[in-house]
Image: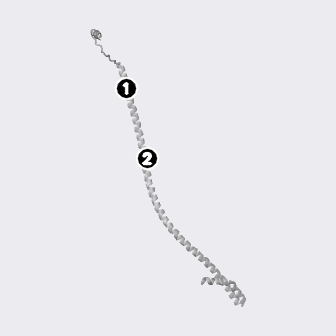
Amino acid sequence: MAIFLLDVEREGVVPAVFPKWRPSIRREWVVGALACIVFATTIGLVAVNETQTNTDFDQTHYSLSLIQHRIDSISADLVTIRHDLSVVKGQVGTDSVAQATDTAQLEKVQGVLASAQANVSHQSSLIGDLQSCLDGVEQASNALAVGDQSGAIDALDAVSLSCANSAASNG
């Protein structure tokens, strides 16, 4: 090594023990430009991605606002429907009580009507018996008026059952 140093001193240039490799200036500019391009591209892609994400967020937020508005509207409708249902339940309860009362009154009236119909039927039968008895008595009276005693007896015998039924019904 000493010989190498002596030899260099004669020439006047001291060589570096570890020589550094230095790229050319053009290569440094190319590498720097590529680094800037990569950096700018990365920034651009991040910006585009951020813009898309922001747009997606805005759309999602808008959709959420619409859904919240619909939920609020439906909730208000539901409150109204619940109120209406409560009113209808009250009316049904009142109507059920009224129907039960009306049904009881109708059953009483039906009982009275059935009794009245039976009474009318009985009265019709009694009127028929009285009419038959009256007709027989009238025939007997007419027969006696002309001196037909046996015709009068026959007329009374024919209506005796109707007259007996009428007398028994009237007491």
Cβ–Cβ under 8 Å for marks 1 and 2: no
Vertically, is 100 above or below 16?
below
Q: Residues within 10 Å of mark 1 (few under 14, many from 20)?
A: few
The one of 37 and 145 positioned closer to us in this rendering: 37
Residue 22 horizontal/vertical position (percent): 34, 18
Q: Which mark is residue 49?
A: none
Residue 142 horizontal/vertical position (percent): 69, 88
Query: Pointer 2: what residue?
Result: 67
How many labels, in total? 2
Vertically, is 23 above or below 55?
above
Vertically, is 101 above or below 68?
below
Q: Which mark is residue 35?
A: 1
The one of 107 and 82 positioned closer to us in this rendering: 107
Instruction: Name the image quarter holding residue 24.
Output: top left
Is residue 68 toward the left or the right of residue 126 in the image? Answer: left
The residue lying furthest to the bottom in this view is: 147
Q: Secondary structure at mark 1?
A: helix
Q: Classify the position of the N terminus by image quarter.
A: top left
Which residue is at 69% across, 85% downward? 157
Is residue 134 toward the left or the right of residue 38 in the image? Answer: right
The one of 144 and 162 positioned closer to us in this rendering: 162
Of callouts 1 and 2, which one flags the residue occurring earlier in the amino acid sequence? 1
User: Label 2 amino acid?
Assistant: Ile
Which residue is at 47% across, 65% downward? 94
User: Label 1 amino acid?
Assistant: Ala
Residue 64 horizontal/vertical position (percent): 42, 45
Residue 143 horizontal/vertical position (percent): 70, 88
Is residue 18 toward the left or the right of residue 91 in the image? Answer: left
Which residue is at 48% across, 66% downward? 97
User: Distance from label 1 to label 2 (Cα)?
Assistant: 47 Å
